Amino acid sequence: MNRTHASTLVAFAVVGLAVAYLGELALVAGGATALVPPLSLAVTLVGIGAIVVLVAWPIRQAVRGEGDRRVDPFRAARIAVLAKASSVTGALVLGIGIGITLFLLTRSVLPPAGTIWMAVATAIGAALLLTGGLVAEHFCTLPPDDPEEEGSAHA
């Protein structure tokens, strides 16, 4: 499995931003109120990011030879996939949070400050989920078998 590329994360963030901004615009143009994510979403995103890092920690110890027990390779693969999914989801929700924030800030009449801060909190929680996913993915990366291959890969 390949590591998550920055271009993939940027693409998901841009899609999330566009969908959120245009979706909010369509809602308000149709006479409905703008959707604002609750604070519990931001807290949940941070919690998931922490859990992903915590479940990847035994894999990191086994890869470095610090642990005294073996890790099931299927478990390691599942955690690596979870880490990748968390980073991509974090990028998407980060874009959504930024899109909602931009929409709220570009209105002629600004909403209450608490509304804007909840959208910003969602973006921050998503950024932490993205970071946790990338860290967990790094924990699940095996070192190269041959030390000479590492030097030639960077040249």
Image: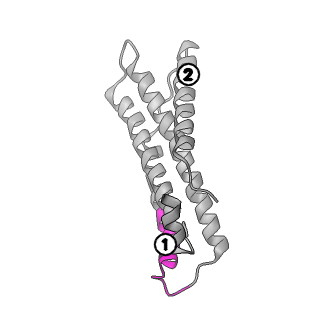
Three-letter code, disc 2 = Leu
Frontmost residue, 15 versus 149: 149
Q: Earlier in the sequence, mark 1 or mark 2?
A: 2
Q: Is residue 61 highlighted in magenta? A: yes
Identified at 52% across, 63% down, the residue is 152
Three-letter code, disc 1 = Arg
Decide if residue 43 is on the left or right side of residue 144: left
Q: Residue furthest right?
A: 74
Name the secondary structure under disc 1.
helix
Label 1 crowd (10 A; few <14 / some 14-19 / many >=20): many
Decide if residue 11 is on the left or right side of residue 1: left
Name the secondary structure under disc 2.
helix
Query: Residue 47, how many percent across, how many down?
Result: 45, 56
Residue topped by disc 2: 22
Q: Residue furthest left?
A: 113
Q: Residue furthest bottom?
A: 68
Query: Residue 149, how many percent across, how many down?
Result: 54, 68
Identified at 55% across, 70% down, the residue is 142
Q: Is residue 16 highlighted in magenta? A: no
Label 2 crowd (10 A; few <14 / some 14-19 / many >=20): some
Task: Provide the major secondary structure of the magenta segment.
Answer: helix
Q: Which residues are magenta?
A: 53-69
Residue topped by disc 1: 60
Distance from Cα at disc 1 to Cα at disc 2: 41 Å
Query: Residue 51, how many percent across, how many down?
Result: 49, 62
Q: Of circles 1 and 2, which is in front?
A: 1
Decide if residue 46 is on the left or right side of residue 92: left
Identified at 64% across, 66% down, the residue is 77
Quadrant, the N terminus: bottom right
The label on residue 127 is none
